[in-house]
Image (cartoon, helix red, strand yellow):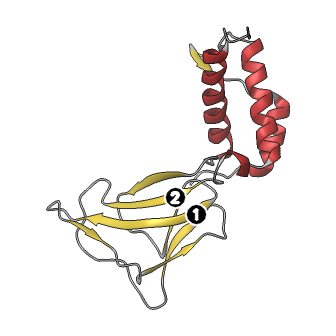
């Protein structure tokens, strides 16, 4: 006979703590695929929103008549060694000059994250554990102001996560 009454609740806390710390650091911990929408090609590069960029699957654009096109991979390079990563024009290349639809005309599909759970850096794992323990012990929401509520991360978890934090795009 075990203590399984709280297993479902703890599993939910793991998800909540992970989301809170991913938001705090602007990273995704486990490998994930995301789409980054922009209204137009602007400048020589597309800075992606999350850290630990693994790869770019595609850069697509939709013209004003809803025709979708894929930018050839020879047009751009993927910069994975910067955090966050980015897509930049290859030497002597330019972005397509088509008239794009008004909103979300450019979509970059990319893969980011540390990999599997065992690849997450130890300080972030510890920050997760501290946050899960805090949420387990403190089950009330925190009032931020004007009726808004938020998850309060423990100061130690914030300190552990701070070196991994990426400023927003």
Which residue is at the far bottom? 92
* Callout 2 touching callout 1 (CB < 8 Å): yes
- Please say whether residue 143 is visible from this viewpoint: no
Label 2 to label 1, Cα distance in Å? 5 Å
- Quadrant of the image containing the C terminus: bottom right
- Quadrant of the image containing the N terminus: top right
Residue 100, x across and y down, in percent:
25, 64
Q: Quick check: 16 above or below 56?
A: above
Based on the displayed image, in which of its 4 quarters is residue 92 positioned?
bottom left
Based on the displayed image, in which of its 4 quarters is residue 101 positioned?
bottom left
Residue 57, x across and y down, in percent:
43, 65
* Secondary structure of residue under mark 2: strand
**In-front residue for pair 151/40:** 151
Q: Which mark is residue 33?
A: none
Name the residue tied to disc 1.
54
Question: Callout 2 environment at 10 Å: few (<14), some (14 to 19), or many (20+)?
Answer: some
Which residue is at the far front? 1
- State the residue at coordinates (61%, 34%): 19
* Secondary structure of residue under mark 1: strand
Question: Callout 1 environment at 10 Å: few (<14), some (14 to 19), or many (20+)?
Answer: many
Residue 155, x across and y down, in percent:
83, 30
Q: Earlier in the sequence, mark 2 or mark 1?
A: 1
- State the residue at coordinates (63%, 54%): 115
Q: Quick check: 104 above or below 161?
A: below
Q: Quick check: 94 above or below 87?
A: below
- State the residue at coordinates (65%, 13%): 141
Based on the displayed image, in which of its 4 quarters is residue 42 positioned?
bottom left
Q: Which mark is residue 111?
A: 2
Q: Is residue 121 left or right of residue 91?
A: right
- State the residue at coordinates (36%, 77%): 95
């Amino acid at each position: 006979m075990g203590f399984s009454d709280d297993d479902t609740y703890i599993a939910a806390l793991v998800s909540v703590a992970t989301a809170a710390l991913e938001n705090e650091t602007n990273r995704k911990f486990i490998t994930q695929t995301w789409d980054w929408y922009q209204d137009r090609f602007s400048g020589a590069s597309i800075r992606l929103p999350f850290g630990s960029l693994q790869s770019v699957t595609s850069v697509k654009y939709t013209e004003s008549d809803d025709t979708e096109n894929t930018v050839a991979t020879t047009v751009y390079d993927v910069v994975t060694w910067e955090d966050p990563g980015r897509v930049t024009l290859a030497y002597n290349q330019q972005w397509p000059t088509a008239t794009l639809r008004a909103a979300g005309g450019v979509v970059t599909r990319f893969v980011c994250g540390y990999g599997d759970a065992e690849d997450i850096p130890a300080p972030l794992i510890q920050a997760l554990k501290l946050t899960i323990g805090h949420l387990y012990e403190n089950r009330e929401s925190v009032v931020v102001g004007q009726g808004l509520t938020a998850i309060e991360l423990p100061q130690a978890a914030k300190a552990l996560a701070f070196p991994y934090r990426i400023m927003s795009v």
